Image (cartoon, coloured by chain):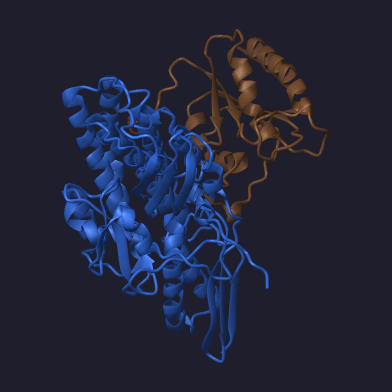
Chain colours: A blue, B brown
Amino acid sequence: MSKRIDVHHVTRVEGHGNIVVEIADSQLKECRFDVVETPRFFEAMLRGRPYIEASHITSRICGICATGHATTSLRASENALGIKPTWQTELLRKLSFHGEILDSHILHVYMLVAPDFLGVGSVIPLASSQPDIVLRALRMKKLSGDICAAVTGRHTHPIAMTVGGFTHFPKNGELEILRQQLEAARADVDATVELCASLPWPQFERDTEYISLTRPDEYAFIDGEIISSDGARLPIESYQQVTNEYMVPHSSAKFTRFQRDSYMVGALARFNNNYDQLHPRAKAAAAAFGMQPKVTNPYLNTAAQVVEIVHCVEDSINIIDQLLQKGVAPEDPVPPSTQGGEGVGACEVPRGILFHHYWIGEDGKMTGANCIIPTNQNIANLEGDMKSLVPQIMDKPTEAMQLDLEMLVRAYDPCISCSVHLTKVVRP
Amino acid sequence: MTAYTDPVGSNHTLVIGIGNPLCCDDGLGVRAAELLASEDLPPGVQVRELGTPGWGLVNHIQGWQRVFLIDAVEMGEEPGVWHRLEASQTQFISANQSISLHEPGLADSLALAQALNLMPDKIVLYGIEPSFTGPGDELSPEVTNAIPSIVKTIKQELWKTT
């Protein structure tokens, strides 16, 4: 038996990547996920710019994870400059971060993944056949964007977040309205869990190393320590011991590995490492999927995102309650306590752990930057999954095999254009 | 519809500027919307700059009687030439199978609104042919010259039909 699958640009992902699988004489000869995006050069763009601009520049790495990049950037600058944000700043950042996680997960679950299960090529035919599902997704997506806009001034690319704090503050009345809307959204959240738990998730298991942030006090999205499901725990400043970036010829994104050949980041890694800290309603949603850590089916990364949708809605309500109890009051950003320095910021953005590492000169200008994005940390693991999956599905018709592989890629929710990291090309 | 969508209230017409001002002429819709918003407009008209709203466009146009969109359009004419296109008389091309989150354009979002029966009674696209849509924040001279004229026409149409 010989087959060749060559998906030139997988659809319903962000950016451009190709699946290449070749089977000759029933042997797997080739199995790759090619990243064909051009490099982005954001780190070079940062050099020489005032640190105060860094979060606004790096927010543009991604139109989906803009708040994630901005928050990670701010934390890197703050750690470099010895700034400890206030309680109010931390809560407001968490709230907008939840807004973005919700927005991204809702889009992935409904617009990118659901069409595979519901037998349509995209969300547009789905809107004709099952409009209630798409209307629900759009309602939830709008609320997510409205959370970001109320806190950071815009749906995407936050304008009100700055080093040390905020330049604009939501009014208490705005937070009260958001709280009511979040409560009203519970029905849509429940319907999302019900729909997704009923989908026929592909059966495929491959244990790997799951890497995420972890915090003692909460399900970690901002700050914390790096934790591996294989047992290691490291401060974020030691991230390079975990990422160990290396290059391969077929990808313009760098690959990473820690204690095994590859590791996985994202909602499933967070779920596996930090399950105990999920909101009880989120744990109930996980039970609806039959999920208990450690889950080793990568297709269920999407299900873990649904669990996080529940958690983020509940935690957003909780954060708003804390803010309203004290009342949001304008406050000046906390000033730097050092002139220049080096700092690392780490956040769990929708697709997994994100690192920004900055060097700031005494004149306040950036002298260096390193950004390591979740998707490129996942690509080696995705290829590992593909290599393990293909022999199990080799007897299926080529089209069915191709769909299984495309669905696997989509399960990782890759943001391929973000993953492309400065790569030196040396021609022989 | 659950309670957590924005009410349109007594407004009836929404004018939306579309595009990315960091990509030169791609941002012409946003620049035109800025100019239009500074003009004296009839009651019930709102002007918004939405940048690149993706699927979110569907949420924004929902509930309005009439929506005017201002965007860069490529119809093979000289830069700066502008067009007035009614959605009911125009086919916007939607790349159905190749949709990604970074790519749902105006056509995809309008197709989605259509499929969901959320289209306003009337959608008018005011489009200007761009000269250059690469990185940069300057409009080309051709587009810069075209903007006051398209804004004036939109303003006249708003006053005449409101």
Q: What percent of the width, then of the height, locates residue A322?
A: 18, 31
Residue occupying image coordinates x 60% and y 52%: B96
- The quarter of the picture where residue A136 lies is top left
- The residue most toward the bottom is A25
Q: What percent of the width, then of the height, locates residue B32?
A: 65, 22
Observer-nearest of B126 and A248:
A248
Residue occupying image coordinates x 19% and y 30%: A321
- Tell me if A171 is positioned left or right of A30 in this view: left
- Tell me if A320 is positioned left or right of A370 in this view: left
Observer-nearest of A228 and A409:
A228
Q: Is residue A265 above or below residue A73?
A: below
Residue occupying image coordinates x 39% and y 31%: A162
| Quadrant containing the N terminus of chain A in the rendered view | bottom right
Q: What percent of the width, then of the height, locates residue A118?
A: 44, 59
Q: What percent of the width, then of the height, locates residue B62?
A: 49, 30
State how many labels appear: 0
Q: Is residue A79 above or below residue A308?
A: above
Q: Is residue A156 visible?
A: no
- The quarter of the picture where residue A73 lies is top left
Residue occupying image coordinates x 31% and y 43%: A188
Q: Is residue A393 above or below residue A140?
A: below
| Quadrant containing the C terminus of chain A in the rendered view | bottom right
Q: Is residue A367 visible?
A: yes
Q: Is residue B64 above or below residue A210?
A: above
- The residue most toward the right is B78
